[in-house]
Image: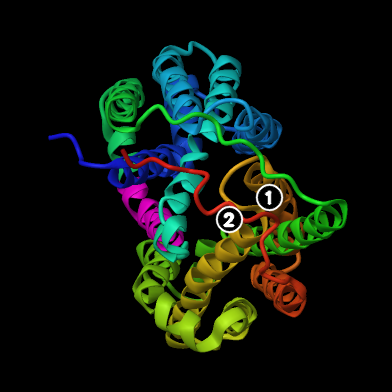
Amino acid sequence: MIPRGPRPVLALVLGMLLVSETALSPFYPALFRELFGIEDLDATGTYLWVCRLAGVIALPLWGLAARRWPLWRLVATGLGAAIALNLALAAAPSFALFTAVSALLVACGAAILLAYPALVGLDERDGDRLPGVVAFAALFHAALTVSTALGAGVLALPEPRLGIAAFSLLDAAMLVLVLRVLPRAPAPAPAPAGERRARRGLVLLAGVAAVAVLFELAAAAVRPFYVELAQAEGASLAGGAALFMLASAAALAVLPLARPLRRRLGAALLPTSLAVSAAGLLLQAVAPDLTTMTGARILFGAGLGLGQVALDLRMFAVVGTTGPGFAAVETARAGALLAAPVLAAATASASLALPLVAGAALLAVAAAVSPLLCPSPLTKEPRDLRFSR
């Protein structure tokens, strides 16, 4: 049954992108050992770095392309390329070729990510971007949970390459939905802006990008060694993994509160959420036992979920849902993901709890800076993205 309207299609496309990008993340060392006989853990680090670099390079290019071509065409192009690349990935005979194809796949996924501002843009006619932003946050945190089980299933297959190739079938289904459901809307014409307003917009764009970098760097730097820390505190491997996923569960649980909290706190929702996340990380770093660590993990996840919503609302208020502004901020975020493993390794070498302290400090700085970002939009473009018939 084909979903009615563009909203479920855009949500499905984004959910598929998030799941496919994260499904194998916890299992790359085992996958490379199974497929190529590679035991060196540095190979996983190299692979991830190359893929993230590909995303950093591709995102601004797709953002510029969005100024000339409609989003439905760019998303369809990304999905079409992903079909062929997933099949090539499954057949890759060497680690080097597997890495190269994966980098191309990530670059194509950057085009599919443009479905996010399209989803948010559906609600701009009502002056309320919150539904699209909350939907994406829910997809993101749900994907972290679902993709772990999916990745484990792929690795458990007698031939994992078949599981990798199966992603092409999902991409093909998404492409059919995009071509059949999304209308052929033309690319939006950029709205004119005065010189003074343009300068102010660039300052706000830089500010939002800086807060986004701090947010992503803090969230990503605390992940690689968290299960190790939990085990050092007395948790089992399964218990550490459950504790790790608790943050995403807490983020999902608080998303229904985003609207009433936004109504009550207004612009203060962003710095408050960032401060709560920072407190949760710091409490985890100094927790004397697993019970305290669990409570602090929930606190961190709650702040993380609301902070993601508040930050993305502020981002779209500044850059709108058309043009290269969204891609510019996402490129900055991708750059933070490049730096996160370096920060995590450098701090964890001194203490497993130190990445949490570093993450708390980054979030505290973001909380202090974020009130300076005025939510006024760069341009008023509430009706630029029309996907309704």
Q: Position of residue 44 (x, y in %)?
A: 59, 36
Q: Residues within 10 Å of mark 1 (few under 14, many from 20)?
A: many
Q: Position of residue 211 (x, y in %)?
A: 72, 64
Looking at the image, residue 79 lies above or below residue 350:
above
For the N terminus, the image quarter is top left
Callout count: 2
Question: Is residue 222 at least partly visible in the picture?
Answer: no
Q: Residue at x 49, y 88 (%)?
A: 264
Return the residue at label 2. 224
Which quadrant of the figure has residue 241?
bottom left
In depth, the one of 62 and 358 nearer the eye is: 62
Whether residue 141 is in magenta: the answer is yes
Locate residue 80 relative to residue 205 in the image: left or right. Answer: left
In depth, the one of 160 and 196 nearer the eye is: 196
In depth, the one of 79 and 214 nearer the eye is: 79
Whether residue 11 is in magenta: the answer is no
Q: Amino acid at mark 1?
A: Val
Return the residue at label 1. 329
Locate residue 100 relative to residue 264 in the image: left or right. Answer: right
Q: Position of residue 93 (x, y in %)?
A: 49, 11
Looking at the image, residue 382 lies above or below residue 356:
above
Q: Main secondary structure of the magenta part?
A: helix
Kindly check if marks 1 and 2 are in contact, taking CB atoms under 8 A apart as contact: no
Q: Position of residue 366 (x, y in %)?
A: 72, 72
Give the magenta part as a residue range. 133-149
In depth, the one of 129 and 100 nearer the eye is: 129
For label 1, the SS is helix
For the C terminus, the image quarter is top left
For label 2, the SS is loop
Q: Residues within 10 Å of mark 2 (few under 14, many from 20)?
A: some
Q: Residue at x 71, y 63 (%)?
A: 214
